[in-house]
Image (tube, grey):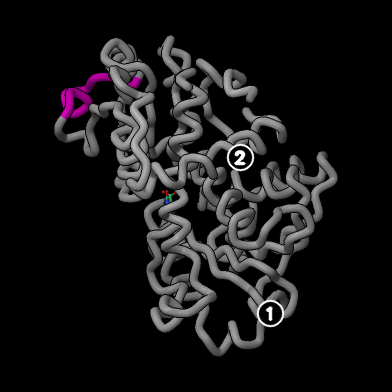
Amino acid sequence: MGLMILKGKDIISIKDFSVDEINEILKVSEDFESVARGEKKLDIMNGKVLALLFFEPSTRTRFSFECAMKRLGGETIGFESVESVSVSKGETLADTVRVMEKYSDALVIRHPKEGSARLAAMFSDKPVINAGDGAGHHPTQTLLDLYTIKREKGRIRGIKVAIVGDLKYGRTVHSLAYALAEMGAEILLVSPVGLEMPLEIKKDIEEINGKISEFHSLEDVIGEADVLYVTRIQRERFPDPEEYLKVKGSYRVDLKLLERGKKGIIVMHPLPRVDEISPEVDSTEYAVYFKQTFYGVPVRMALLSMVLGVM
Ligand code: NCD
């Protein structure tokens, strides 16, 4: 099955995977859906410990890793705020990692600084999985985003995905745009002026001949897109609060807009949402964002079992 390809590997950026590896993870994820739902029992993580190092708030990422591990018979340890651990006494990230790797088989880390996961990996012999490094990357979110598109639209190649919102500070979209390009989707970027996708990422996408175009208005893409991938403005990453106020509330996806969309258009969001999606959308066929959060469990099961070399 080729499941050993990722054994022992650090997962820092989506670029750490080849397209074949991504396809393999998406395939294996499907097998885990019934376990993620609690319908089928599996004990393959018995005796394994996953350390969760969360230096920044999280709901879905942390709990879906936890849920994935526990439903597979494994255990988790960790923290979700720096106040409760020795970081608050001045312990360095390097030392925290050197300690936590002694207590676990793999580490998941979320940290406000870009590059922190890469740094953590240098101090750990155990695999390190990046669960978000500042405005940098969020590769496991991308895997579940790709899985959602594949599950809901049947394929990724040729699908037109409009990525909407804060493309400058949003880490999920940095990883996602690159992966979509690699997988042959077409990318329509929609952001307020000043929050465009960083140049390096656009350059990386051009290098692999990705199809990408940029807009500032939802009106420009609503007739084209198969998927609207909506994100919140990342208030906590703005150096100047005044700048945030200028762009706050730039986009709002509501039924009026979606009714003018392509037949079968779906709305995704990594969550949390603030005001980008009107709640009236939640109970319609367009809304896929809560399903998307569920898909985080089978995808993380697949990834963890490959990285830990079980199965
Ligand atoms: C995102 C994140 O933390 O980058 N959330 C998530 O992991 N699902 C998105 C966000 O915070 O806006």
Secondary structure of residue under mark 1: loop
Picture mark count? 2
Q: Check the picture and name the quadrant holding the N terminus.
A: top right
Q: Amino acid at mark 1?
A: Lys
Q: Residue furthest right?
A: 209
The numbered mark at residue 263 is 1
Residue that label 2 marks? 27
Q: Residue 172's x, y, as percent?
A: 52, 49
- The image position of residue 88, as x and y in percent, is 18, 29
Q: Is residue 186 visible?
A: yes
How far is disc 1 from disc 2 in space, using C-alphas? 27 Å
Contact (Cβ within 8 Å) of mark 1 with mark 2: no
Residue shown at 64%/34% (left/top)? 24
Q: Amino acid at mark 2?
A: Lys
**Rendered image quadrant of residue 35:** top left
Q: Image quarter for residue 55? A: top left
Q: Which residues are magenta?
A: 85-93
The residue located at (42%, 78%) in the rendering is 283
The residue shown at (63%, 73%) is 265
Q: In the image, is 167 to the left or to the right of 244?
A: right
Any part of residue 61 in sight: no
Which is nearer the N-term, disc 1 or disc 2? 2
Neighbour tally class for label 1: few under 14, some 14-19, many 20 plus, Cα within 10 Å: few
